[in-house]
Amino acid sequence: MLPSRKYDCIVIGAGPAGSAAAMEMARAGLDILVLDRGEFPRFRIGESFLPRTKRAFRRLGVLDKCLALPHARKLGVEISLGDARHGSQYFHFRDVYGDGDKEAFNMARMHLDQMMMESAREAGADVRTSCAIEQLPRLEDGNVTVRTTHGEFHGRWLIDASGQASTIGKELGQRRFHSFLRNVAYFEHFEHVVRPSGRGQNCFALTIADEGWFWLIPLDATRTSIGFVARETLHRNLDVPSEDRLRWAISRTPMLRERMANAIGPEKNRVISDFTYRCDPFAGPGHFLIGDAAAFLDPVWSTGLTLGLLAAEQAAGSVIRMSRNSSPATERARHNAWMKRITDRAFRLVEGFYDPNFRDLLFSRNRTKQLERAFVTLLAGEIDDIPFGVGLRCQALRGLCAVQRVWPVTGRVRPFRIALSSPDAPTAIVSSAPSA
């Protein structure tokens, strides 16, 4: 009987991070197997990308493929309160420090994920879908075994890009949730949502309430992704069925009511929970974690896909170097250090959003332009190689938040509270079949 094939690396998950890692390794001449429990095309959220994401796609050689898919330009972020007090604040990527990309795009993930999976196949990876992981009997340097619904597969190394399934994190008991960011998102796709014009044209719209926040993401010429991310205190105590909570929140938020006045979409919403966790250490005997399998962040600044693609580059590089006799201990240490540094930065950026003192500064009319540009640079996803001056300005911004906490340097912004707001006439969402 012939011995079973032993791959150079097995990748769990054919999403963008897993497919990117597979492309890198296959193009370097390695024998790569990608396993995914799902089928393509498939629905996913995470539809808003950053300028740094665009650069990662360009490096992979798939940017032209991305831009050939249905998409919408993204020039910056529009931030508003739910009742529109203080107007809208605009943060444009053209103000980013450095010579990186000054704009990005949004698109439905079903298109992107399909393209990335097919590109991994074109690069030479063996991609198998509808293949669920059952067990990881062996995780050793140079020797891993993955047991699936299609049998056992053997490899020298394993990259876990399984997303929120967190295959290795759950197997090894490493997944730890954030102390207070235990949020839930309620979301759907709609047609005919009013989009901002003027300074807000082609911007990701973020609307803030005390109980959470809304995203409004244009996906193409007519379709918009709408979501409401609710804080734990609301989603645990609200006496409304989970599939009706998006409509409930919209009906009580003037800014959303206005933009959804003529929207067409499903009456019921989708739900995703288990925000925000990390699964460190991010590398161990025989394996590396990337993307949402390593850490899942609250999606407020759209950092997830960027972090996944950057981590894919790091993990793939480690496997390639080990195939050329680099030490596994060295590569593990390198990956863990890089992932910890980047993940810590991303977590600080997300945590800052939920600080009411930061909200005060966001809506201040006396914002310092240099500090604002440093903030926009991080919003653009430039967190893997932060210029020294940007880092200093971001530290200064955190210092201002600390000062604001005890001695206001700018006015306090009274939060808009959904729970205290009365619903207007029923939100005019005309029922249609759920989006694919």
Image (cartoon, grey):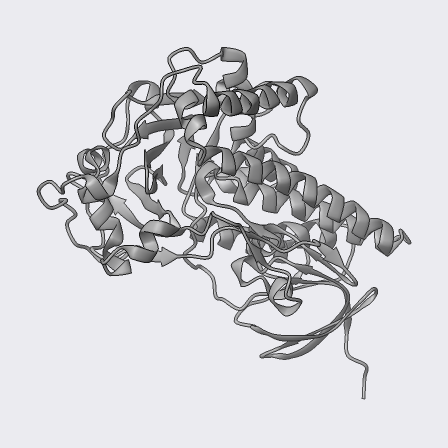
Tell me the quarter of the image containing the N terminus: bottom right
Q: Is residue 213 left or right of residue 112?
A: left
Q: Is residue 72 left or right of residue 399?
A: left
Task: Give the residue drawn at x 63%, y 66%.
Answer: 173
Measured as percent of width and height from the top left, residue 186 is found at: 33, 52
Front residue of 254 and 377: 254
State the residue at coordinates (49%, 66%): 38
Residue 94 drawn above or below residue 428: above
Q: Residue furthest bottom?
A: 1
Q: Quadrant of residue 84?
A: top left
Q: Position of residue 301 (x, y in %)?
A: 47, 36
Q: Provide residue 156's location: percent of width, then percent of height.
A: 80, 65
Q: Residue at x 75, y 62 (%)?
A: 31
Q: Is residue 5 above or below residue 72?
A: below
In the picture, residue 54 is in which quadrant?
Answer: top right
Residue 148 in view:
yes
Q: Quadrant of the C terminus?
A: bottom left
Q: Residue at x 32, y 42 (%)?
A: 211
Q: Is residue 72 above or below residue 160?
A: above
Horizontal side of residue 428 vs 356, given as left or right: left
Specify the farthest residue to the front. Answer: 406
Q: Nearer the viewer, residue 171 or 199?
A: 171
